[in-house]
Amino acid sequence: MDRRKAEARIRRLREQIQRHDTLYYVENRPEISDAEYDALFGELQELERAFPDLVTPDSPTQRVGGVVAEAFAAVEHRTPMLSLDNATTPEDLREFEARLGRVLPGQRFEYVAEPKVDGLGVALLYERGILVRGATRGDGRMGEDVTHNLRTIRSLPLRLRGTLADLATLEVRGEVFMKKEAFQRLNRELEEAGEAPFANPRNAAAGSVRQKDSSITAKRPLDVLLYQVSYAEPAPFRTHWEVLQRFREAGLPITPRVKHCPSLEDAILYCQTLEAERERLEYEADGVVLKVNSLEQQRLLGSTTHHPRWAIAFKFRARQARTRIKRILVNVGRTGALTPAAELTPVEIAGATISRASLHNADEIARLDAREGDLVLVERAGDVIPHVIEVVPEPEHKSRRRFVMPERCPVCGSQAHRPEGEVVWRCVNSACPAQVKERLLHYGSRRAMDIEHLGEVVVNQLVDKGLVKDLADLYHLTVPTLAELERLAEKSATNLYNAIQKSKDRGLARLLFGLGIRYVGEHVAEILATHYGSMDRLVRANEEELSEVHGIGPRIAASVANFFAQEENRQVLKRLKEAGVRMEEAVAAGPKPLAGKTFVITGTLSSMSRDSARDLIIRLGGRVTSAVSKKTDYVVAGKEPGSKLDDARRLGVQTLDEAAFLALVGKS
């Protein structure tokens, strides 16, 4: 692959991964399986290894996926809660041990193996044996304070016993989950109460922990298993196995299936045995986590920005079943993307009844040669999202009609078009009711304009009744009009009206994200809002000017310029402004001591995340770039700095350790 194509593919992969991170970690409604996510992430890693100069600080490979939600106070983790590297075969595990040997030649490795419980990662802080704080994993660096909810979990001790109770500070990490039987019981109760059931145990656990009302959490059958010490003062441990035994003595729950493995072959046998017994486990597990037992070896092996080098997740094979395609449907997204899906004869996979599966796009259907009536193999990879992986050969297959993507939108009848270089067909009519509905839902979502009560039922009625044709129409709705909608009495209508009015003051970054401009995610929206400060300035910028903004590549620049060049979009913006929607980003008052200075950040900072450091530099007037050049003023070097520190020394650029950086920004 040449550099130009690699650069374009890398951009696309980053946007996809960041979107799926938000869906998985924040909204708890993943659209793809772990296997599909791992494939995207692996492809990005391979491309960045092949083209290392294209690696940027905001790449998903440089940080852990995920975003902190706004409902709870933010908590910065003392050390990042990293992801895990993956293995799917014994050969992968042997290669993992070979990598360990290359870092620590001549050393022998023992392992601890534990089931990889499918739940919500948490960090628990104990001081003198008392639970003082519990936080979610969040984005790995910043989580949410959910102490009040975690205290309701019966299996979690509020006070430790034994020698761990004497430690001044102890931070442990684990997984909050729901046992299979408890999950099924909860869903039955919800259905009997007329409420929507949860899709799977992980969503049930995550949704319960993130309840604002802890009394609701207390009624949920949550459990917890602890698996790691992330910080201890003092630190009286030598091995991970010892840590787990001390957990048990202190009353901290650990999995009874944990095993000390003297060799890698013992660990491989454990993985194979546990996979064979998977169905008999009382909780959902999608693999096994192997960790080097020696804590000193763990320290020497260290971590990348994505995963510890001393641990790996062995992923179980996804579960599959055969069923038949009843018909192939085509859904329409907010950008007009036409996405095919298979309506199936219902089949049970991993405890869930599956009646629909993804077919991804026209190319995938052609590759499978999937046709209505075919017998297919459906995989629920990661135990969550089903998709068709192959067509089962049958004599009747060839007599069935091939599926052809519609030439017209199935909703509005407008022409369908497949842009050059894309796998997705699109409806070209931006006024298509299906697109309008999806745009409204996106605009009102929590990370965009956060319009509470603007859900699918309401949006469908607003569009179907002709009350809303674009985003600006939302701000012309009245309480009496809203009260006429089904399921919306006057009180609910008033609440929705107030939520719409409240959204006017969200600021430029969230408005830009909410507009649904292609390739403009939250991060890009923040960059544009910070650089331009107002919608008027941004609208006047041409494609060339946009592409010169750090972090905005040619494709994003072209998309943004094209969006604002369209008269219908400019009219919507005009009407949004007339309705009182704020079109400027709030500018922080105060001195700008770093004005004109350019920074590069490398390594891990202990006092703040790299994103926080970047925001601080920008707030004080500085600029942060991804690569070191002669124009760079400072390179901030944290723990485990990368090659950028070498570049700084070679070019004679001044380097700052964390203490010097904090002194420079006035936080010493």
Image: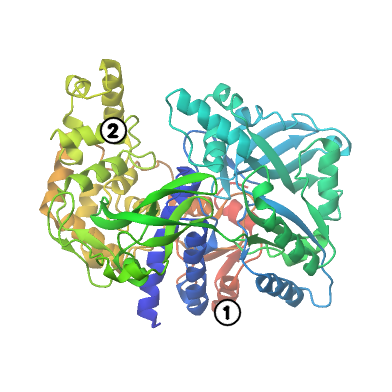
* Amino acid type of the residue tagged 1 in the rendering: Arg
Q: Nearer the viewer, residue 259 or 65?
A: 259
Residue at image location 67% in from the left, 30% down from the top = 153
Q: Is residue 377 visible?
A: yes
Residue at image location 12% in from the left, 53% down from the top = 413
Q: Name the residue that disc number 1 marks.
A: 650
- The x, y position of residue 396, in whole percent, is 33, 67
* Amino acid type of the residue tagged 2 in the rendering: Val
Report helix, strand or loop for mark 1.
helix
Tag of residue 570: none
- The x, y position of residue 178, in whole percent, is 61, 37
Q: Is residue 303 left or right of residue 502?
A: right
Q: Nearer the viewer, residue 637 or 506?
A: 506
Residue at image location 71% in from the left, 73% down from the top = 94
Please tell me in which quadrant of the rendered image residue 267 appears.
bottom right
Tag of residue 457: 2
Q: Which badge, 2 or 1, is on the more N-terminal residue?
A: 2
Please tell me in which quadrant of the rendered image residue 376 appears.
bottom left
C-alpha gap between disc 2 and disc 1 = 60 Å
Q: Is residue 265 left or right of residue 389?
A: right
Q: Residues within 10 Å of mark 1 (few under 14, many from 20)?
A: few
- The x, y position of residue 146, in whole percent, is 59, 33
Q: Nearer the viewer, residue 39 or 449?
A: 39
